[in-house]
Image (spheres, helix red, strand yellow):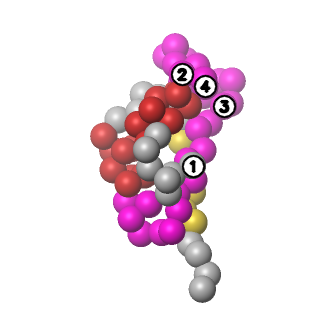
Amino acid sequence: MKKTVSVVFGTFAPMHKGHIDLIQRAKRENDRAVVIVSGFDQDRGHQIGLGLQKRFRYIRETFNDEPLVS
């Protein structure tokens, strides 16, 4: 049986309930959800003082116990 994988891409700057709902929906509707945090130097995160590492850490902390999110 084929597995489905969703990809959620964004700056997550800042991460909010809409992002969380989108990732949870992607997880519910697929076998797995892959979250990609933009690391472009001039993206919104850098402009508002949320560097890539901090945004990535927030995603990991929020979904740390969820095996279907990577």
Q: Which residue is mark 3?
A: 39
Q: Position of residue 23 (x, y in %)?
A: 42, 52
Q: CA distance from mark 2 to mark 4?
A: 6 Å
Q: CA distance from mark 3 to mark 4?
A: 6 Å
In front here: 61 or 6? 61
**Sequence-first disc among 2 and 1:** 2
| Residue at point 66%, 31% (across, down) | 39
Taking 53 as reference, is 37 above or below it?
A: below
| Residue at point 44%, 60% (across, down) | 26
Q: Mark 3 is on which residue type?
A: Gly
Q: Residue furthest top?
A: 49
Give the secondary structure at mark 3.
loop
Q: CA distance from mark 4 to mark 1?
A: 16 Å
Q: Which residue is mark 4?
A: 52
Q: Which residue is mark 1?
A: 70
Q: Position of residue 20 (x, y in %)?
A: 37, 45
